[in-house]
Image (cartoon, rainbow, N blue to C red):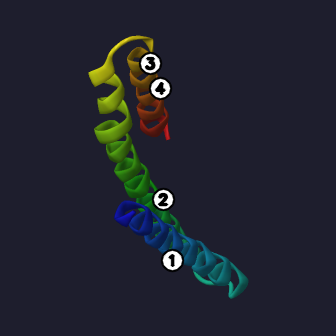
Amino acid sequence: MKAKQDHHRRLRRIEGQVRGLQRMVEEDKYCIDILTQVSAANSALQSFALALLEEHLAHCVAEATAKGGPEADAKVKEATAAIARLVRS
């Protein structure tokens, strides 16, 4: 459950960053300052995604591969597709 709490905490922080972006736009802040904050929010989301992927690989994929069979192949393909999406983003 600690991981779930950590995920929620990180997502709330990211949500705060996005709200901050909304405020900056409403207050007509300098575009470069807004872009800097967009970059920070993107980095935070990527970091969250990588942490979630690491957890998925360590638990779900590892467990499925230990059991073997078609479920293991499906989990590996699923993880590979997720990694490909992250790399493209």
In the rendered image, residue 42, in percent from the top left (x then y), is placed at 48, 59
**Marks 4 and 1: which is nearer the front?**
4
Residue at 35% across, 66% down: 2
Do residues under tags 2 and 3 come within 8 Å of each other at their CB atoms? Answer: no
Amino acid on which disc 2 is placed: Asn
**Marks 4 and 3: which is nearer the front?**
3
Q: Among all residues in the image, which is located at the extreme right?
A: 26
**Whole-number angstrom distance, CA of label 4 to CA of label 1:** 37 Å
What residue did someone put label 2 on? 42
CA neighbours of label 2 inside 10 A, class few (<14), some (14 to 19), many (20+): some
What residue did someone put label 3 on? 71
CA neighbours of label 4 inside 10 A, class few (<14), some (14 to 19), many (20+): few
What residue did someone put label 1 on? 33
Q: Among all residues in the image, which is located at the extreme front?
A: 67
Q: Visible in this render: residue 40?
A: no
**Whole-number angstrom distance, CA of label 4 to CA of label 3:** 10 Å
**Marks 3 and 1: which is nearer the front?**
3
Name the residue nearer the viewer: 48 or 61: 61
What residue did someone put label 4 on? 78
**Secondary structure beneath disc 2?**
helix
Amino acid on which disc 3 is placed: Glu
**Secondary structure beneath disc 4?**
helix
Residue at 34% across, 46% down: 55
**Secondary structure beneath disc 3?**
helix
**Marks 2 and 3: which is nearer the front?**
3
**Whole-number angstrom distance, CA of label 2 to CA of label 4:** 23 Å
Residue at 38% across, 36% down: 60
